[in-house]
Image (tube, grey):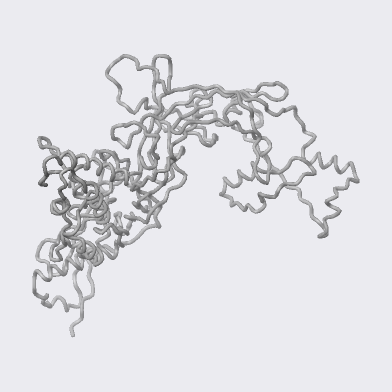
Amino acid sequence: MNKYTIANLSEALSRRTFPTITLWNRLEGRPRTANFDRALKAEVRDALWMLTRQWQLGEFQGDDAGSPVFAKLHVATTRLTRYQAKDHPPTDFADQHPLEATVERRAIALTQGQQRLSLDLRLLMGRQWLKLIRTPPSGTDYRSAYQTRYPIDLPDPMSRTDAPICADLNTWQQVAAVAGRRLDGGQLYQYLTTPAPAGEPTPQVSDGIAVAPGDETFLAEQAVKFVQWFQKLYDQPISENDAWDSARLEYQFACSAPIATSETTSREQVLVADEYYQGHLDWYNFDIDPAAESLLPKPESTEPPARPSVLQTDTQTLIPNPISFAGMPNTRWWSFEDQKTNFGDIKPDTTDIAKLMVMEFGLVYANDWFLIPYTLPVGSLAEVRGLVVTNVFGERTWIDPSGAGADNDWQRWSLFTISQKDSPDTPSIVGKTLSDQQPASNQLLLLPTVPKIQESSPLESVLLVRDEMANMVWGVEKTIPTASGISQSGDEAAIALHNVYQRLLNQQLAVAPVPTPLDRANIRYLVMTSVPENWIPFIPVHQSGDSRQIQLQRAALPRILAGDPNPPLKVRPRTNLLRPGLDQKQAYYIHEETVPRAGVRVTQSFQRTRWRDGRVVVWLGARKQTGRGEASSGLAFDRIVEGQPPS
């Protein structure tokens, strides 16, 4: 059989088995002089030249296509109604709030183990509480009482607990300057928002305070305002409803919108985002989950649910408008463009597909596009179910979607459409007909997102790198939070903290180490080399129930102090990114594929944007970026090293 013979033409066109190849050349004149007076006259001397010129430009290949005058559009629209962060219970979708803040917001850590953080926020919260209780009904001044109840403690330079504070001189000075003089609003906020254990009364703002008669109601109302003020100032996750997946170092969440399948039954269109970490949230972060019918669990009742009222259909007749832009090429021979767009100045690379598409659209197909305006609500999922175009000759044409076809067709490409999530039930394209394949979705997702977000300097920064020589992964803490609220270099903080612990040990022993003959030996046996304390090890361990798959488990190295007679303590991470489950004494695992050979860099910083109603939204979010390759910690065991030669 001839290879150019197509047995089934319709199927070949639908599957795009034989794509066309389009080539064009740009004809440019080469002037022989700098005087364009004669050229601008456009003198015509040879009619044959005009005919050949028209033939070169394809003007003899005419068609009977007419310009569109009417377009009848049928659109089905549904609203996003539910939102689910990771595996937490679903909640109502809030389209009056930026979706980036809803997804990325993380709880601001006011404590880290036994250490208190964010002194700047604690002072700000304390000043706000003192403003709220200035005018109680009885006129009593409660400022000194609350400062005594929730104080800022003075750091003890001889205490191992306060060693992280005293290791940094600036932090030590800032905490000592306000200790005993200011109110710690963070303690008050944590006391009011921490749930009481079972069987115990709910915490009240007046607990431990001698309250005058009639002021308890006033203080309780101000406490509610205080909590709402802080949650509005910094957007916090509700009831620890955090979408951050610490095992994969990315956000996972899902949204759903009801769609009607019949008159009596209904289901939801579930959109999942399994790998969001870029900081730019839009339609391309979502995939349609065809296996999920709803974010809610299946009801026990067998009665069919009611048809959703949020699904709306609309049919409008509109007038198409030709697309135009500044510097658009003019189709007439003797007309000149306004030169507002210089396509010759665009120098795309071979990988700049977007620039090449813009040039092709502007130079070749710009006159063939028309715009049909249609307004959609924010937070909606829309689908064009029908489009009929009527031209000047009265002909009506049914327009099919450009991205229609099989969703798993490798030749299919479309923009602003959502792909379907792969599932075991999805049939393969090999050996299947068009009716057996999963149809592509032509729905348009319009999310309540913002175009611009301001990002602060990293509050925390962690670099996860692979160390092939040590056969493990290291979590290098490049930036750590301090008690003052200002971040500090992880390398400098690790050295300073180690020196403080060594100084405390020397003062505890109160004797200088006595040299031994081993100190002057030519060679020494070294059990293990030292590693900076800001390098947190992650060792490979087998997954439970599997003998081949492995995960990376957070481990700890001992803190070696010279002359310490006690067993060494473990070095703990100082960033919240590497501390999941540490305070609860739980293990922390990271999937092995999360840390590639190039490594990853994870940062946590404050994000700020302005919403459409003018209010400012601030939240604490995380980002993940590609690292810079492998690293070597220098960790080694059982080494023979050169000693100090005898004098």
Residue drawn 30% across the image and 25% down it: 297
Q: Find residue 482 and report its image quarter.
A: bottom left
Question: Nearest the camera: 277 or 631?
Answer: 277
Residue 325 horizontal side relative to residue 103, left or right = right
Res. 238 in view: yes
Q: Find residue 14 and report its image quarter.
A: top right
Residue 582: x and y, percent? Answer: 20, 49
Question: Nearest the camera: 10 or 568?
Answer: 568
Q: Residue furthest bottom?
A: 647
Residue 85 horizontal side relative to residue 410, left or right = left
Residue 3 horizontal side relative to residue 160, left or right = right
| Whether residue 273 is situated above or below residue 179 in the rendered picture | above
**Count of picture labels:** 0
Residue drawn 26% across the image and 40% down it: 240
Residue drawn 42% across the image and 33% down it: 421
| Whether residue 305 is situated above or below residue 1 in the rendered picture | above
Res. 465 in view: no
Question: Nearest the camera: 313 or 397?
Answer: 313
Residue drawn 46% across the image and 37% down it: 283
Query: Is the N terminus in the top left, top right, bottom left or bottom right quadrant?
Result: top right
Q: Find residue 216 and report its image quarter.
A: top left
Q: Residue furthest right?
A: 45
Residue 139: x and y, percent? Answer: 16, 47
Residue 642: x and y, percent? Answer: 23, 75
Query: Is the C terminus in the top left, top right, bottom left or bottom right quadrant?
Result: bottom left
Residue 278: x and y, percent? Answer: 41, 46
